Image: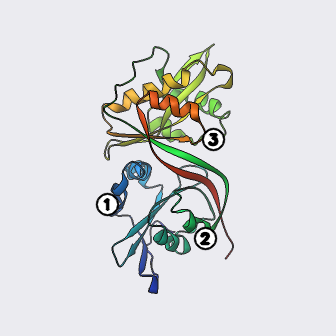
Amino acid sequence: MSRSSTRTQSAGAGGWTVRETRDRDEILAVLNQDRVYAAYGIGDLEPSLFEQCEWALAEHADGTRALALLFRGLAPDTLLLYGDARGLAVILAGVMRPAQAYAIFTDEQAPALHAHYALAEAKRMVRMVWDASAPLPPPSPLAFRLTGARLAEVQSLYRLYAEAHFSPYQLMQGVFYGVERDGRLVAVAGTHLVSETYGVAAIGNVFTHPHYRGRGYAQACTAAVLRDLAARIPTIVLNVGADNAVARHVYAKLGFAEYCEFHEAMAYRRRS
């Protein structure tokens, strides 16, 4: 899908019209139907991230809409699906056809993805959202703000974290805190994105070096990131593995409530 061109595909008897879009207001109207689940898509409307996005919109004659986002700012590309599964199936059959992508989707949307992609490394995830009425965690003397000057150390730590979805721009543009012990960085928590324009942020890439676990360092870092964001961002979300009971408990203690479940998986395009 080219960023400079606009293609429209009609689905005939199905009643769907599918097209690329770069209209932020049009995109936001779909995403605002479920701001918590769509927080990543909303944050990607920020100018610094929007240029790394490709969007496709499906509209039905009855007014139903579906939206797909292909984000190219991370490796591999990330495919995020929003809205009606029937419309998403038409999008993936036509104007958005990545050869492979890291897909994020709900149970209801799974058939649309399965129709065109083989899935691997699937994980069931939980979206959590911060309860703004909850008391903020107290500041920790352990956690300190990380800047771009510590990029090499952050990258070195994340090499031990196979599930990290990190790119240097996140450190430069976002909010990261770390804990240092024995002269090195041993724990970190940060943001996937921060959008003051649209009032959303996503906390992620929370990790502690295996030799330093069980000491509360990840919680201290996450709490520091949360405190930094809470004064200016009304919608703060994070993702956690559905089977990670310990992390879910820690995030609940920080004031996060479980919102919904979804899936993440590598998606590989089936041969036509």
Give the residue pinned by disc 2. Answer: 115
Left or right position of 254 against 92: left
Mark 1 near mark 2, Cβ–Cβ under 8 Å? no
Mark 2 near mark 3, Cβ–Cβ under 8 Å? no
Q: Amino acid at mark 3?
A: Glu
Q: Is residue 262 above or below residue 135?
A: below
Q: Amino acid at mark 2?
A: Ala
Q: At numbered mark 2, what does the secondary structure look like: helix, strand or loop? A: loop
Left or right position of 34 against 213: left
Give the residue pinned by disc 3. Answer: 163
Q: Earlier in the sequence, mark 2 or mark 3?
A: 2
Q: Earlier in the sequence, mark 1 or mark 2?
A: 1
Q: Is residue 148 visible?
A: no
Q: CA distance from mark 1 to mark 3?
A: 32 Å
Is residue 190 or residue 265 the one in the foreground?
265
> Where residue 254 is drawn, which disc sits there?
none
Q: Is residue 131 above or below residue 8?
A: above
Mark 1 near mark 3, Cβ–Cβ under 8 Å? no
Q: CA distance from mark 2 to mark 3?
A: 26 Å
Q: Amino acid at mark 1?
A: Ala
Give the residue pinned by disc 1. Answer: 29
Q: Nearer the viewer, mark 2 or mark 3?
A: 2
| Residue 5: quarter of image | bottom left
Q: At numbered mark 3, what does the secondary structure look like: helix, strand or loop? A: loop
Q: Residue at x 52, y 34 (%)?
A: 248
Residue 50 position, x and y percent, is: 42, 54
Q: Residue at x 34, y 29 (%)?
A: 134
Q: Report the coloring of the rendering.
A: rainbow
Residue 272 position, x and y percent, is: 67, 77
Q: Is residue 265 above or below residue 167?
A: below
